[in-house]
Image: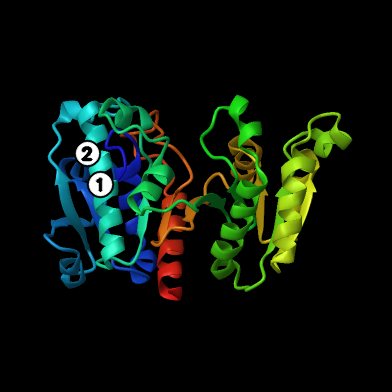
């Protein structure tokens, strides 16, 4: 359900109001009943919330019902719109943990997550940079990649939530090659190709300008690309990020995925193109996990005006990937 003080509960109900979406999967919401009821009032939805004890019970509900597995009983003061709280942060952690457990045991086919507040989780003592790192720990997975995707651009990241000053030392041949491998494997079912075309960005302006602006390209990125090609992967680059995305958004897209070196390098252009319909996919996990590509939108919480497009896309993609498996 995500942070109850944000737009998560609202976009979930708005997304599930679409009959076509409910036709591609049986949804199960993990979260807080009071928060979901409040969202239902805001969204004026005709959907009914029905508390269930097990995921299987969701299969027995009528079309106008949404199954809810209650994992918290928060007070209004714990989830005031736009205000992170310690109790909400702990509840959010438990929602994510239970969802991962249900996926790992096969009780559910996939998970699609609403936005969380890292501040709230940190207040509760759960010190993770975000969903991705927490899920990787829960799944005991070291080779994971965060990718944001729309229908034109798909961008995977070598480094995720890192201070910019730390990025250069984290750009190693091993890390870049791992990201290329996981991206190629993870994006294959999305693009319908066993040989997806991967583009790799440079770290420095002008690809380092022959070492004048940095040596990460020669030291780490070029060797990683060469190693990936030896393995049979279709990889091109490194490309200078300032010009690359002009060509990458042409249709049909020339590449199936882009490997960017750091968060803002890849996600600023991605969100310019796919602000409403983009989603987050964690590649490399033994489970299927998608997410919205936006935050808690505290300024919109409680208004019913937040767009559900990303949540709809996340659920559709999770269902599609689950069907493929």
Task: Assign a secondary structure to mark 1.
Answer: helix
Picture quarter with the C terminus: bottom left
The reply, left or right, for residue 243 in relation to residue 96 is right
The reply, left or right, for residue 296 in relation to residue 143 is left
Residue name at image x 33 percent, y 43 percent:
8
Task: Assign a secondary structure to mark 2.
Answer: helix
Image vertical order of residue 147 relative to residue 191, above or below: above
Q: Nearer the viewer, residue 67 or 164?
A: 164
Q: How packed is label 2: few (under 14 Cα within 10 Å), some, or many (20 or more)? A: many
Image vertical order of residue 14 relative to residue 202, above or below: below
Q: Is residue 293 visible?
A: yes
Q: Nearer the viewer, residue 188 or 271?
A: 188
Q: Quadrant of residue 188?
A: bottom right
What's the CA distance linking mark 1 and mark 2?
6 Å
Q: Which residue is mark 2?
A: 91
Q: Is residue 253 visible?
A: no
Q: Quadrant of residue 49?
A: bottom left
The dot on residue 95 is: 1
Q: Nearer the viewer, residue 94 or 67?
A: 94
Q: Quadrant of residue 215?
A: top right
The reply, left or right, for residue 285 in relation to residue 210 is left
The reply, left or right, for residue 171 in relation to residue 63 is right
Residue name at image x 63 percent, y 73 percent:
193
Q: Could you say where residue 303 lies in the image, as x and y percent from the top left?
A: 34, 35
Q: Could you say where residue 154 lies in the image, as x and y percent from the top left?
A: 61, 54
- Mark 1 and 2 residues: CB-CB less than 8 Å, in contact? yes
Q: Could you say where residue 205 lies in the image, as x and y percent from the top left?
A: 79, 33
């Amino acid at each position: 359900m995500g942070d109850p003080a944000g737009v998560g509960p609202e976009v979930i109900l708005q997304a599930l109001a679409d009959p076509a979406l409910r036709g591609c999967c049986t949804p199960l919401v993990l979260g807080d009943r009071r928060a979901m009821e409040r969202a239902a009032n805001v969204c004026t939805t005709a959907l009914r919330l029905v508390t269930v004890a097990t995921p299987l019970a969701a299969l027995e509900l009528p079309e106008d019902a949404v199954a809810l597995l209650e994992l918290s009983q928060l007070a209004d003061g714990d989830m005031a719109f736009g205000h992170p709280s310690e109790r909400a942060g702990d509840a959010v952690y438990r929602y994510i943990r239970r969802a991962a457990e249900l996926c790992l045991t096969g009780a559910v086919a996939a998970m699609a997550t609403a936005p969380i507040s890292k501040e709230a989780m940190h207040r509760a003592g759960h010190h993770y940079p975000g969903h991705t790192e927490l899920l990787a720990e829960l799944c005991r997975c070291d080779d994971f990649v965060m990718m944001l995707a729309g229908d034109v651009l798909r961008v995977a990241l070598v480094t995720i939530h890192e201070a910019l000053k730390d990025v250069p030392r984290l750009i190693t041949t091993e890390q870049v090659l791992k990201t290329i491998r996981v991206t190629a494997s993870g994006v294959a079912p999305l693009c319908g190709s066993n040989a997806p075309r991967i583009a790799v960005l440079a770290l420095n302006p002008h690809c380092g300008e022959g070492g004048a602006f940095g040596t990460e390209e020669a030291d780490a990125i070029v060797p990683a690309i060469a190693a990936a090609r030896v393995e049979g992967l279709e990889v091109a680059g490194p490309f200078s990020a300032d010009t690359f995305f002009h060509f990458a958004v042409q249709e049909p897209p020339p590449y199936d995925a882009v490997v960017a070196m750091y968060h803002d390098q890849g996600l600023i252009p991605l969100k310019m193109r796919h602000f409403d319909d983009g989603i987050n996919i964690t590649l490399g996990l033994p489970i299927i996990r998608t997410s919205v590509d936006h935050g808690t939108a505290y300024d919109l919480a409680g208004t019913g005006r937040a767009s559900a497009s990303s949540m709809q896309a996340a659920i559709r993609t999770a269902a599609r990937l689950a069907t493929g498996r």
